[in-house]
Amino acid sequence: MADSSKFLEAIKAGYSFKGESFKIGCGVLDGNVMAGSDIVIPLKTMNRHGLIAGATGTGKTKTLQMLSEGLSNASVPVLLMDIKGDLSGIAAAGTVNDKITDRCQKLNITYKPTGFPVDFLTLSNQKGARLRATVSEFGPVLLSKILDLNDTQESFVAMIFKYCDDNKLPLLDLKDFIKVLQYVSGDGKDELKKNYGNISTSSLGTILRKVIELQQQGADVFFGEKSFEVDDLMRISDEGRGMISILRVTDLQDRPKLFSTFMLQMLAELYATCPEMGDVDKPKLVMFIDEAHLIFQEASEALLQQIETIIKLIRSKGIGIYFCTQNPMDVPASVLAQLGLKVQHALRAFTAADRKVIKQTSENYPETEFYKTEDLITQLGIGEALVTMLNEKGIPTPLVHCMMCPPASRMDILTDAEIDAVVSHSKITNKYNQAIDSMSAYEILTEKLEDAAQKEGEKEQQAAEERQEKRPAKKDKGFFDNPTVKSMTRTAGNTIIRSLLGVLGLGGRSRRRKSLF
């Protein structure tokens, strides 16, 4: 049996922070919640990213919900990627029941049912503000990574973007990019070759096929206008709480490449837009990505490198990224190494492979004299987790078995009517849901080709007229020059002549005279 006084001493020393923080639970030792062992998260370190992991039904989503509430109360905006569609309840106040009352007594907290300020976002036609970005905003590098192009093809894409910039051809959606590819492989090939260099037809064909493949996966839903502005993710409500933006992407579960494409663009846009912040007292924005394995499931090596790079750099912008997934091994080791906060809910060991994963997982956590981590991971109850994080100096805190605080908001989804009410009161939905079809590369090139075809037709007609004018002039034919009249005249003349000769006895056949003798 572990020494409780030593445990409390370790927890107080490890989880006492300067600056603003909020409570997420209490330490547990030998199955008992220890009074005075509050586990708190310092806002100052929440831009150092994190991981929430555990098997289905162990409480990951509720932990994510509770963390979002704590950030919102601290005036930190939150972006939630809602893959399963079960996070909408954060907009409504929770309800008290016996389990929550019992848990709150153990944690020495008062339960206050509270709804939080929420905006719903969507990538498709679901309810909420439409989230879009233009092809130009993706840029040639990111678009090439998404399409999994080689270095040569990537240089061609960069050349095409340069051509479009120089010729004022806006690339807003995929049909614009497809039209440009078709143009430079046909009528515009000589123009591109003359000013920018030659592009092989086979490379253009490969790029075009991959763009069409991306389009067939439904990528059109978030390419276009009006582009979503990053500042709208970082708003504070009228009551001073951070807005919680819930991006509902339930229709992307079976399209992981599309989801990873969108996520990478979102991270790249945040990185490019936000200024350097350095060490701040609290983050500017925290993003939670539920079912994070979808980002990495079908991502190419180049795409993974891009994600890793952005994760490393974006914390200096005051932005924290938190991945929520069933198995920590779903996250590449290079990304996992960047995650300061780790909340490990229970894992289940049904097979030898499962036990191997649990052993590997336990080795990723700090050593502790109070628990046998490998065994405890399989014994954690619902709403309990192993927790460790970074302190202000970047040193991991002691690993602790933590009973998590319950969310103050509803632990269930909103009804359709409730979602409609939230959307109707949104300050940004009308801003982004207006259909815009600006003059872009598709329309400009189509008009250019039509003008060229019309001019070519006019040129051919003019040439034909000129040829006609150069032919020798012919005399006007009179009545008797008409072939029909000539034929009739000849026939009539021949008849008259034969008649006259007949009268004179000279016409017709010669007859033999009869002998008089």
Image (cartoon, rainbow, N blue to C red):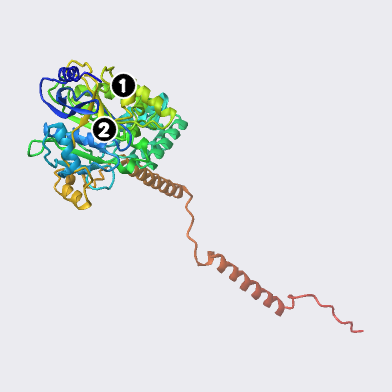
Provide the secondary structure element on which disc 1 rests: loop
Left or right placement of residue 238 versus residue 361 in this view? left
Q: Which residue is mark 2?
A: 266
Q: Residue furthest left?
A: 239
Residue at position x 45%, y 50% in the image: 468
Q: Label 1: few (<14), some or many (≥20) within 10 Å?
A: few
Residue at the extreme right of the image, as rendered: 517
Spot occupied by residue 367 in the image (x, y as percentages of width and height): 28, 17
Q: Secondary structure at mark 2?
A: helix
Label 1 to label 2, Cα distance in Å? 40 Å
How busy is the neighbourhood of tag 2: few (under 14 within 10 Å), some, or many (20 plus)? some
Q: Is residue 234 visible?
A: no
Report x, y in % for residue 267. 26, 30
Q: Amino acid at mark 2?
A: Met
Instruction: State yes or no: discs 1 and 2 in contact (Cβ < 8 Å).
Output: no
Position of residue 50 in the picture relative to residue 299 (left or right)? left
Of the 4 image quadrants, the one containing the C terminus is bottom right
| Residue 197, quarter of picture | top left
The residue lying toward the viewer, choosing from 208 and 48, is 48
The image quadrant that residue 123 belongs to is top left
- Compared to 304, does 505 lie above or below? below
- First in sequence: mark 1 vs mark 2: 2
> Which one is closest to the eye, mark 1 or mark 2?
1
> What residue did someone put label 1 on?
372
Task: Name the residue furthest front.
Answer: 1
